Amino acid sequence: MIEINKSTIASWDRFYRANFINSLSGFKSVCLIGTKGKDGIPNLAIFNNIVHLGADPAMIGFINRPKAAAPDTIRNIEETGMYTMNHIHPGIIEQAHQTSAKYDASVNEFEAVGLDILWREDCAAPFVKDSPIQYQLTLSDIIPIPANGTFLVTGYIESVYLQEDHREADGFLPLEQYQSVTSLGIDGYYQTKKIMRLPYARP
């Protein structure tokens, strides 16, 4: 087995190190987060560090990079308290990835990358029209992580929209039937295949 210690990792070129460490944590959920700030300009950004926080109440979290590097999404959420998460399918991967570019805050990123916007009543934040699974959230907390200047953003799920109803009898949502993609590292995108479901484990 190969050992790679932290001194070796620290000595690497920063892009090599970033690719390695970003891949090390494994396959991750990836979504487009839609927001709109007080200026009224829609914003769209790809995030691949999304985590389930609980089902009662239904909560989702994501990690926002330091504000100097990624200010728009977190600023808009702070201003309006509302945002959307939108699954990505293979047909929109390139447009979704392009939202990682550092556009000026005055740019409508839906238009810039060629994705259609969808507005829904009672939601100040925009959805991605072509996304097979979309959900609306309201802000719970923005928790600073002092060690690296990032933030854990947590929110309550308000509404979920499914392009088709593939729910199983027990509520399980088989994402492969929606062609939802997953990500690896900062620029790798994958499709998934279910191996099995196992019963609830007991001693």
Image (spheres, helix red, strand yellow):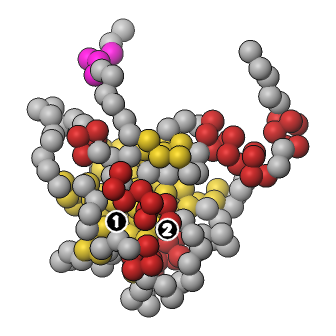
Question: Which of these two is toward me, 91 or 162?
Answer: 91
* 83 relative position to 79: left or right: left
The residue sitting at 18% across, 77% down in the picture is 121
Q: Nearer the viewer, residue 51 or 140?
A: 51
Residue 172's mark?
A: none
Of the numbered discs 1 and 2, the one sitting upstream in the chain is 1
Q: Give the position of the C terminus as an image quadrant.
A: top left
What is the crowding at mark 2: few (fewer than 14 residues within 10 Å), some, or many (at least 20)?
Answer: many
Q: Nearer the viewer, residue 54 or 102?
A: 102
Name the main secondary structure of what is drawn in magenta.
loop
**Left/right of residue 99 with respect to residue 66 in the rendered view:** left
Location of the N terminus by quadrant is top right
Q: Which residue is mark 1?
A: 84
Q: Residue sitting at 68 percent across and 41 percent down?
A: 21
Q: Secondary structure at mark 2?
A: loop
Q: Position of residue 144 (x, y in %)?
A: 61, 61
46 within the magenta span? no
Q: Residue at x 43, y 65 (%)?
A: 95
Task: In the rendered view, tell whether residue 155 sits above or below residue 166.
Answer: below
As measured in the structure, the alpha-carbon distance from the residue carrying label 1 to the one carrying label 2 is: 15 Å
Q: Which residues are magenta?
A: 197-201
Q: Amino acid at mark 2?
A: Thr
Decide: is 159 above or below 7.
below
Left or right? Give the position of 131 relative to 21.
Answer: left
Occupied quadrant, residue 109: bottom left
- Which of label 1 and label 2 is nearer to you? 2
| Residue 36 at least partly seen | no
Residue 99: mark in rendering: 2
**Residue 108 place in picture, x, y as percent:** 43, 82
